[in-house]
Structures are given as structure tokens and as C-alpha cells.
Image (cartoon, rainbow, N blue to C red):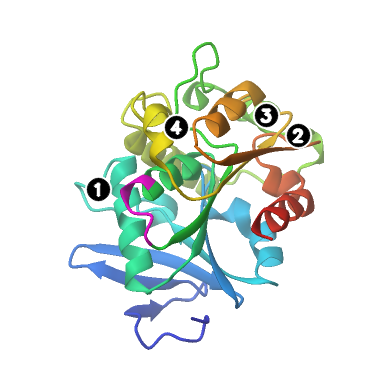
Amino acid sequence: MTANSTQNISTQNIASGLQILQLSAGLTLTVQILGQGSPVLLLHGGGGPQVLQVFAQRLAQRHQVFIPIHPGFSGTHRPEQHNTIKDLAATYATFLQHLNLQEVVVMGFSMGGWIASELVLHDSSRIGKLVLVNAVGIEVPGHPVTDVFNVTPAELARLSFHRPEAVQQVPLTPELMALRAANFATLALYDQNLKMADPNLHPRLSEVQVPVLVTWGESDGIVDLTYGQAYAAAFPQAQFVTIPEAGHQPQVEQPDRLLTALQSFLQ
């Protein structure tokens, strides 16, 4: 299926170039679709889909890339009872079925990695490979996920990036601050006070039968390398690749290195 093959998609085009898909009577999903080729589903973290844009544009030179916005993020609609990571996983299983996508590479970033892990456990029938980028979601004794809800923006940047001063920062207008606050509130809602980790997820990952790549920015101050190594070890068949000179968002700091790791895995 190409980005122009929309005959089986109930969508509404909106000014930003995104599409709104009606997945059920009460659930819509806002999705950006780029490029052509084999399908890759990108699941964003708490920072929202905008932090994936540079990486997604490069990935779209070889693949068809789908970037949904988790319901409730970036001002999108979230049904009242849609409030867990498993709800999001079920939504994306429905999304893959809705578009009749096959052999999809599912790539999850931070919180999106948690969703991706739950998705492949929920229904792997349309998933070819799983890629996690500095994912959260499991418990690793002695290596907790940093409480991002109780740090200042400056401290969050320091923990998130290898070189915070080199990352272009968008000016914090009142509108952007309100949007970030709303996104964090949505992130907290989906987290269900589990501190970005579900104690039941780690042991269940042994059931995953698709090949897995776990990539990790070496300078991550949100979830450290030991946490990443434990994540990879939980799967029956997983590769663990570190991204140098990158923190929690290697897609921002080192998009080419991340893309190289991904293409090596896919080949």
C-alpha cells in the first residue's frame, strides 16, 4: 500500500497534512503518512510526534512511514475510557488491520517502546519486526526510570541529551508551554501511576516471537544502559545496539546513526 492508496481508508484531510482515521464509532486516530515502500510504524514518546520528524523524513526515502498521534496528545481526541498503555496497543492493532498492513516494522521511542512491546504481545500477526529506542515500560531492580514529572525543563534536557546545548530548542511560548503541560498530563494518565514501568511486562516479553532490535543512546539519563540491556535480554531473540553521542532521543541527536542501525537490522 502506498501513501496515495486511500480507497480503503476512512479519512479526513486536515490543514497540517495529517489524516484522521475513524477506527471505531468513538475512536479516531490522527496519522501522518510519508514515503513509499515497506511499512514502518513509528510510535512517539512523551515528547510527541514532532521529535520524530527529521528521522521520519530520512526513513521515508526507503519506506512508507506511519506516524500516529496517541489519542490525547497534541490536542487530539481521547475517549474517556481510553486511558492505559494496553488501550493504545489495542488501538494500533486495530490500525494495522484497518489499513491491511502486513510485515510491519514497529518502532517505538521511550513511551512508544512500551506501547510497541504491548502491541506485539497483543497481536503480532501483522508485525514483521520490533524496534525499541530507549524504551521504558519494564522494571529493572536498581535502575528505575527517572521521574520526568518532577524535574525542571532544564534538568529534563540535561538528562535527555548527550549535548543539550547543541540541540535546537524551540522558544517556550505560552501556547507551547500549555501544549507541553497537556501532553505531560496525558502521559501521566496513560502511565496509570506506574512510574513508567509495568511490573508485569518484563516476564511476558519472553513470549515475543518476532525479531527485536533494542537501540540505546549511550548518554541517556532517563533510562540507563543497564536498563536497556535488561530490556533486550528479556526477548528470546534480540540485538542490542548502542548509539554513541546520544541520550534519550537518538533520533534527534544522531538520526543517521540510528537509521544505519535500523537498516542493518532490517537487512
**Image x and y of residue 133, in percent:** 60, 42
Instruction: Tell me how far mark 3 sits from mark 1, CA to CA.
Output: 30 Å
**Image x and y of residue 234, in percent:** 49, 30
As drawn, 23 above or below 180: below
Q: Is residue 85 or residue 30 the one in the foreground?
A: 85
Instruction: Tell me how far mark 3 sits from mark 4, CA to CA.
Output: 15 Å
**Image x and y of residue 125, in percent:** 37, 60
Residue linked to disc 1: 82
As drawn, 171 above or below 135: below
Q: Earlier in the sequence, mark 3 or mark 1?
A: 1
Left or right, 61 with respect to 45, comes to right
Quadrant containing the C terminus is bottom right
Residue type pointed to by label 3:
Asp
Q: Residue furthest top?
A: 142
Dot 1: few (<14), some (14–19), or many (≥20) neighbours within 10 Å? Answer: some
Residue linked to disc 4: 137
**Image x and y of residue 157, in percent:** 67, 32
Instruction: Look at the numbered discs 2 and 1 and tell me whether their residues touch, using CB distance below 8 Å.
Output: no
SS class of the residue under badge 1?
Answer: loop
Instruction: Tell me how far mark 3 sits from mark 2, CA to CA.
Output: 12 Å
Instruction: Tell me how far mark 2 sits from mark 1, CA to CA.
Output: 34 Å
Q: In front: mark 3 or mark 2? A: 3
Residue linked to disc 3: 220
Residue type pointed to by label 4:
Gly
Q: Earlier in the sequence, mark 2 or mark 4?
A: 4
Q: Is residue 165 or residue 130 the one in the foreground?
A: 130
Residue type pointed to by label 1:
His
Q: In front: mark 2 or mark 1? A: 1
Q: Residue 118's quadrant in the figure?
A: top left
Residue linked to disc 2: 164
Residue at horizontal 38 percent and vertical 49 percent from the top: 119
Residue type pointed to by label 2:
Pro
